Amino acid sequence: MARNYLKTKFEEFERTNEWMKLYQKLKVDSDKQEQAYNLSVKVSRHPDNANKNRYRDVSAYDHCRVTLKNRGENDSYINATPITVEGAGRKYILSQGPLASTANDFWEMIWQEKSRAIVMLNRIIEKNAIKCHQYYPEESFSRELQLESFVINLISERVTPHFVVRELELRRLKASEDHRRNSCGTDSTGSRSSLSPDEEEDFKSDEVRLVSHYQFTTWPDFGVPQSAEDFLEFLYEVRKSGQLNWQAYGPPVIHCSAGIGRSGTFVIVDAILVMVENGSDPQSVNLCELVLELRKSRMGLIQTMEQLRFSWKAVVDAISEEKWRPLMKATSCDRSESPTSNTRRLDRGVANQLISGGHFVSVDESELRKRSIVDISESLHTSKSARVGVSDPMCATRSKRRSTSIAGDECSPPLKKRDEHESDDDGEPQPAEETNAAANSVSKSEARRIKVNDMVTRMRQSEQRLQRDPHLFGLRIPSVAAWGAGAAVVVAVGFFCYYNY
């Protein structure tokens, strides 16, 4: 069976410690494959499109990329790739994290492809560097974000210790005549062509769509998550919504910063688990072969040796442990709560009242004041770690006790020769020089706002962790035992001081 095959191979690689050898072979085979299939990136590196790429050496292949239809020929590029896993019956769109200049294009792609789910695997700021533009609204700040062609409203936001789930309302603005004319392409004679009936109707549409936004927030700055449990719980949350079912919805959009490292990990784990549950032939459930196959569509998927090992370990944990049986069967549209999650959800009745004519209005001021008081009190204890972008140490201790941590080198082997370019600690390349400084520059006030926003999210997650797991001196123990142990320590210290001083 596929389950036994995956477990046996993982144990073999662990015993012989051949992960680096396995990853290097994957890299060599990938380079040969790129040459054999002549996988070109001419459109991505065209001067008109160079400033739309977050990283100089992460491009979308010409034969397999999303093309924005309601645009002119020279304005249809976006760094995003459709991925199909035939054996799992899955389709995804893998994208880079939007730039300030491509945020509208990103939502244009969501609208065009009819996607109803966005999976975000990074934070806005990591290691004091902006990894992604703030392309969505958050409860901490404005609940409405208006772009050139779209208005995005926040309906609800649910924060857990390791991820955030947002429900967004996406509304397209009616296009002006100038914008409609500029969106027309040119025909073979060079004259401007008209939009198709479907495209014309799309421009006039007042349709409002709901989009779910899933953000995994505890992927560390170095390497991979210390525990596969947090990642699998996040995958379960996405799966149980049914929004990975592209036949019922559009393909989900998966992105991190470059859209290859963490995004590739998510896709590989999800697809392999589907194949195992479907009873696929063991020889067809070959994780490395699947990575190599998907690299024909998007370069560099699974960017480091650590990500390769973590992908395999997450799959083995999911198929081995009984508690993950619901994850394996989570294919329906059930939106019930995960038994392991302790979350705070914005009341749906209140959420429905928040929208008035497309704009949010204040409904429950007392609730907002209560949340502000909680956030301020948390900031007294957590602001230091939040300012420097360090994860909650108590959470880290809990994760280490829960599972064996996965070692990670600071730098990953390069995908290909990168001049002075080197890989980031999380397996994604350092950003190239901005080719359009005016379009991609971030003001100090904007950077400060993003940092504060990230701090507030961390504080809310810290509240969830403290509610779920009482701690004493950084150790996770039951609350009664925590109080008892604390009292015993105080009494022991008192007796010691009494008899010795």
Image (tube, helix red, strand yellow):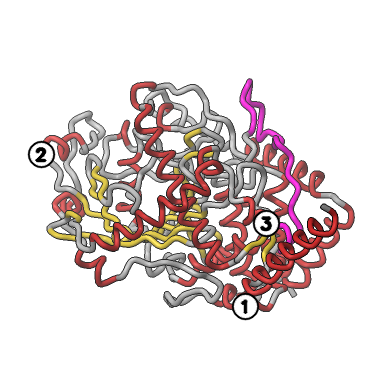
User: How far from the left and from the top, in percent, is residue 55?
Assistant: 51, 31
Question: In the rendered structure, which segment of residues is drawn in magenta?
Answer: 399-423
The residue that appears at 59% across and 51% down in the rendered structure is: 392
Q: Which mark is residue 177?
A: 2
Of residues 273 and 86, the one drawn nearer to the viewer in this rendering: 273
| Residue 222, x across and y down, in percent | 65, 42
Q: Amino acid at mark 3?
A: Gly
Task: Judge from the rendering whether residue 382 lies leftward or rightward of residue 364; answer left or right.
Answer: right
Residue 433 image offset from top left, x and y in percent: 49, 22
Q: Are marks 2 and 1 in contact (CB under 8 Å)?
A: no
Residue 42, position as x, y percentages in the image: 48, 30
Circle nearer the viewer, 3 or 2: 3
Identify residue for label 3. Answer: 474
Residue designated by label 1 = 325
Tag 3 near tag 2, CB within 8 Å: no
Residue 6 position by quadrant: bottom right
In the picture provided, is 131 more to the left or to the right than 450? right
